[in-house]
Image: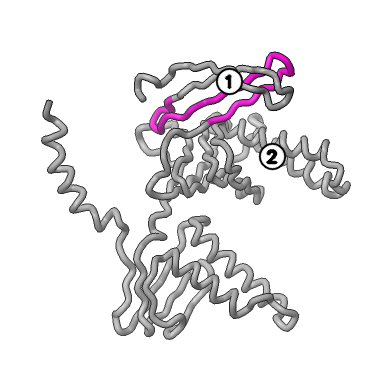
Amino acid sequence: MEDGVNEISKIESLCPNCEKNGTTILYPKEIPFYRTVLISSFSCPHCHLQNNTVESIAPLQPFGKDLTLRLLTAADLDRHLVISEYCTFRIAQLQFEMPPCNRRTHFSTVEGTILKVAENLEEKIAQDAKLLPAEREQLAAFVAKLKQLLDREHFSPFEVELSDPSGNSYVENYLAPESDPQIVSRNYKDLQRDFLKSEYASVAIPELQLTLEEGSLGGMYTTVEGLLKKLAEEITEKFPFFGDSVEEVRKQRIQQLVAGLQQFSEGKNLPFTLVLDDPVDHSHIGARESELLFYSVKKQLELDWPAACTG
C-alpha cells in the first residue's frame, strides 16, 4: 500500500443529480500520526454538482474510543478531525449531539465541521415547510450559537467530543509525537472486564447514585458491559411503562437511571466508578485483557524478534 499512497486516480462515474457522466478523483492521504484515509472528490461539468467524501481504509480497532478536545484558542479551530461513520460528535456546551451517519467518514477541521452543521440547519430552516414558526426561531437561535463558537475575535473556550465504537476517529495533535494535554482519550476496553458477583455482594455506581444491596440480582458472571445492560433491563421490567401511579419525580429518576446505565454500557459519558463490596470475598472484577496477556505477548515478541531481523 505504501507505493499507492498519494497516487491520484481519476474515474468516470455517473452523476446522481443529472445522470450524466462526471469525474471522481480518488486520493489516498496519509494523515501524520494517524493512518491513511481515502479521499473521494466528485464533480460534474454538466450540472456542476460537487461532492467530497472520506473513507477510512483501516479496519475496526480492538477497542472503541472517546476523544475530548478542549479548544483554548482560536487556533484550535484549525485542528483536523476524522469522524468515522460510527462516531457520535458532541458539543456539550450547547447540548448538541450529531449521531453516526452510517455512510461516510468525515474529514475536516473543527471549524469546518461546526460550519457544516450550521449550514445543514440553515438549509432545513429554509426548505422544511413543516416547521412551525417557533421551531424555526429555535433552530435559528441555535445556528447563531454555533457560529458564535467560530468567532475568532471574541473566542471563548469550549469542548468537542468524539465517541467512536470503531476506534477509527481522530483529533489532530499539535504536539505530536508528544501527548497533548488538550486531548483526552479513553478506550472502551474497561467495559469488557470480567465481572463475578456472589449473591452476598452489593454493587454501587456513585455517578448514578445507584446502590444494589446484597442479594440483589443473585450471583452472576458476566462482563461490566453485561452487568450494566442487565441492570437497565431489570429496572425497566420492574417499572415497565411508568404508570400514572408512579410519582412524577420518581418517574424521572427511573428514566434518568436507565438512560445513564445504557449510556455507560455503550461507552458514553466515561469514565464512571463501579464498586463491588462482598463480605465473603467471593466476587471479582477482572483485569483488562491487555494486562492479562502482557506476559504472553511479551514472550511472543521475544520469540518473533530474531526471525524479523533475519534476511
Tell whether label 2 touches label 1 (CB within 8 Å): no
Q: Nearer the viewer, residue 285 or 72?
A: 285
Residue 292 spot, x, y in % from top left: 25, 58
Q: Where is residue 245, by image quadrant?
A: bottom right
For disc 2, the marked residue is 146
For the residue carrying disc 1, how many other residues have a C-alpha within 10 Å: few (<14), some (14-19), or many (20+)?
many
Q: Where is residue 233 in the image (x, y as percent from the top left)?
A: 54, 72
In this view of the protein, can residue 230 be seen by the observer? yes
The foreground one among 251 and 198 is 198
Tell me the residue that label 1 is attached to: 24
Residue occupying the point 39% across, 58% down:
190
Residue 75 shows in this picture: no
Is residue 287 left or right of 32 when viewed as pictured? Answer: left
> How many numbered dots are placed on residues in this image?
2
Give, as a single range, the part of the protein colored magenta: 30-54
Looking at the image, tell me whether mark 1 or mark 2 is earlier in sequence order. Answer: 1
The answer to whether residue 79 is magenta is: no
